[in-house]
Every structure is written in structure tokens, then in C-alpha cells.
Amino acid sequence: MRVILREDIPKLGEAGEVVTVKRGYARNYLIPNKLALEATEGNLKTFKDINRAREARSEKERGVAEVTAQKLAAVRIVIPVEIGNEGQLYGSVTNQMIRDALAEDGIEIERRLIQLASPIKELGTFDVPIRLHRDVEPTIQVVVEGTDGETGSVDWEAAVEAEEVKEAAEELETEAAVVEATDADDAAVDEEVERVDHAAETEAEDAAVEEEE
């Protein structure tokens, strides 16, 4: 029996893929658990339209990402930090600080896109990837260098704590926005799939009635 997978299923296929399985497996497991739909002509058309819309949106996002990537290609930002007598940094360089430095150069990048594995805690030059799209990930150079202390006396422990609080607040705000946007997209897709489910069930019931007659 041919079915359309609604979710990725290990060793079987990916969401949207049409696969052939045993009728019992489809009727008793995949379809009841909303993991697949019967590959009827109507269902195939609906999923094709959904996938086309998703691909078009992804392609548009990729185009925007590639334009931004060109701007980032030659970017080299310098972040001055206070250092102790033995060369250790007071605090560390975070992706929020990198974001702020980019903004000063006129490049606005969401902090969550800056792929810093962990805060930088030493002087030097570092390559930091920016994940603009799943297929677009340029790298920028971040130079961390010491200052001569002209900024005066600073409570670095308090400054680091404030930075962490700021990052946590922005992280929650960003995640909330992403979840809201994702939920909106998922709701639209789920609504369409639910409609297809209902149509498929009605078709199956009609077929059963015809067999009984």
C-alpha cells in the first residue's frame, strides 16, 4: 500500500515522501497515529502544494541570506577588553557583544544566528560562523585585544552578570518570537492536513458503505 509520510520515520522515509508499506502496517499503525496518509490522488496533490509553498519560502529566505552573506564575507570586527596583569580577560566575549559590534558597523544580525560554541576567554583572532540559513553560513573574523585601561575603574563582576541577564532576557524574547512564527506556520499546515484526513476518512466510510450494499 502506498502512503504519504507526515513525519520523518527512521528506516522508512522523510516527511512528504511516498513509500510502499504493508496494508496492515498502514491501516493499524501509520494512519491511526497520524504518521501517514493513504496516497490517494487528492492527498498527493495537497501535499505537493504544501511542499511547494515550503520550498518557495525557504528559497526566498535563502536569497536574503546570500545577500547578507556577501556583506559579511570581508567583515573583521575588533572587540577591546580589559585584561589583568597576567593577561587574563575580565569576563569574556559573548555572541551578544559580537552582535553589538556588527550593529555598530551597520550590520544587524540576530544573536541566535551567531554560532559561538562558548564565550571567548582569551586574546586572539577567531573565526565565528553566522548561520543565516541551513545552506548559508558565512564566517567572520573576531579580534579580541586588550585596552590600555582608559575607561577607568569598572566593576567587571557586575558587568558580566548584567551581560548574562541581558542575554537571558533576549534569548527568551527571541525564542518566543520563533515559537510564535513556527506555531503559525504549523497551524496552517496542520489545518490543511486535518482537512485531508477528514476527506480521506469520509472517502473510506463511503467505500465501506458501498461494499456493504
Image: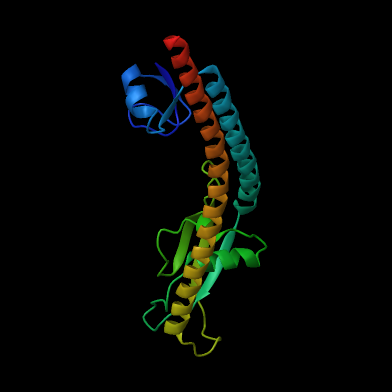
Q: Along the line of sight, which residue is nearer the eye, 143 or 108?
A: 108
Picture layout, residue 52 above or below residue 158: above
Picture layout, residue 12 above or below residue 66: above
Q: Along the line of sight, which residue is nearer the eye, 16 or 23?
A: 23
Tell me which residue sits at (52%, 38%) in the image: 190
Residue 49 located left or right of residue 39: right
Q: Along the line of sight, which residue is nearer the eye, 39 or 114?
A: 39
Toward the front, the furthest residue is: 213
Tell me, yes or no, if residue 39 can be seen here: no
Q: Residue 91: percent from the left, percent from the top?
A: 42, 76
Tell me, yes or no, if residue 208 can be seen here: yes
Q: How many marks?
A: 0
Kindly indicate the quadrant of the structure image that contains residue 150.
Answer: bottom right
Tell me which residue sits at (52%, 53%) in the image: 179
Residue 81 located left or right of residue 12: right
Q: How is the image coloured?
A: rainbow
Picture layout, residue 117 above or below residue 157: above
Kindly indicate the quadrant of the structure image that contains residue 195.
Answer: top right
Q: Which image quarter holds the N terminus?
A: top left
Tell me which residue sits at (47%, 62%) in the image: 125
Q: Residue 208: percent from the left, percent from the top?
A: 44, 16
Q: Which image quarter holds the C terminus?
A: top left
Q: Residue 37: percent from the left, percent from the top?
A: 45, 26
Tell me which residue sits at (51%, 43%) in the image: 134
Q: Residue 12: percent from the left, percent from the top?
A: 35, 26
